[in-house]
Amino acid sequence: MSLGCVSAILLTCFESYLDVSNSPSARFHGNLDITTLGGAGFASQRTTTEDNTWDLSKYDGILLQIGKSDGKRYTFIIKDKLLPKNPENGREQSTTSWEYDFEAGAGESTSGETSSIYIPWSEFKATYRGKEKKDAGKLAKENVKRFSIMMRSFFGDQEGDFSITIKSITAVSKPKDLEKGFVELAARSAGAQDDEGKPKSYFRILVEIVAIGVFAYGWCWLICQHSDDLRLPKLWS
């Protein structure tokens, strides 16, 4: 189920834009100047309609198709509840957000390729006003009201110009809708990370498993060849 292109509304502490092309794709970009608030800040774009409701209960998660990216960390956000604006100040009232942080490699898709990030529902973290909400219950997948993408400073870890191209945002079911070639396919949920703390791709995990198997086979073969000296019975002749 494709959620289509994001209809943009400026929801930023700083300057950001969402340029929609005929590809179709959308480029989320801008500048994050964290000096204004002493290291804090965010910029985001979201769906504008408040009347639509997406029933995603039959799907297993969200698939982000990413084009060219700067390699910075972004956040994909879902809301399953919206409240009327505060009558006193006209501002939107806060509700629980379901968030997932992700990174796409810098410079990817320069040759037209697409990197895919699959996010199972279990990987979305409930937050309220930027803080984790452990008593949030479960995401109401049958009542999704809004989705958005955010660039945040992560308490001063990143700032300045940012840019990421989003080719599609789709609700998917396993294994029918999933295709080969994912850069990241729930590796994060498996807890697999590289030396820099980033999620490993399934290809890298598979290579490591094969390497371990080859090492174990070689070690077993060596022991069996010298089993007489070690007074161990041979497993095969």
Image (cartoon, rainbow, N blue to C red):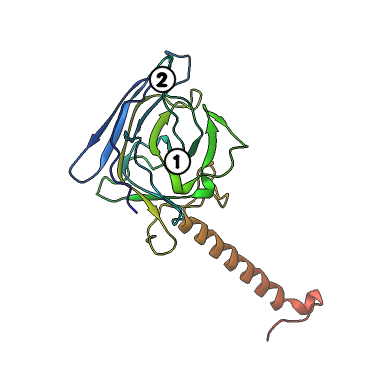
Are the two marked residues, 2 and 1, in contact with CB atoms closer than 8 angstroms?
Answer: no
Q: Residue at x 78, y 79 (%)?
A: 228
All told, the count of numbered labels is 2
Q: Position of residue 145 (x, y in %)?
A: 40, 39
**Quadrant (top left/top right/bottom left/bottom right) for the N terminus:** bottom left
Q: Which residue is pictured at 44% across the width and 21% down the height?
A: 41
Give neighbour class at mark 1: few <14, some 14-19, many 20+ (Cα, 10 Å): some
Q: Quadrant of the C terminus?
A: bottom right
In what element is the residue under mark 1? strand
Residue 199 visible (yes or no): yes
**Camera-nearest residue between 149 and 208:** 149
Is 175 placed left or right of 1 in the picture?
right
Query: x and y percent of residue 222 in the render?
Result: 67, 72
Residue 188 at least partly seen:
no
Residue 151 position, x and y percent, is 40, 30
Q: Nearer the N terminus, badge 2 or badge 1?
A: 2
- For the residue pair 174 and 69, the one nearer the viewer reads as 174
Q: Residue at x 37, y 23 (%)?
A: 12
Mark 2 or 1: the one toward you: 2
Q: What residue is pinned by disc 1?
A: 102
Q: Which residue is mark 2?
A: 91
**What amino acid is at disc 1?**
Phe
Residue most extreme to the right:
231
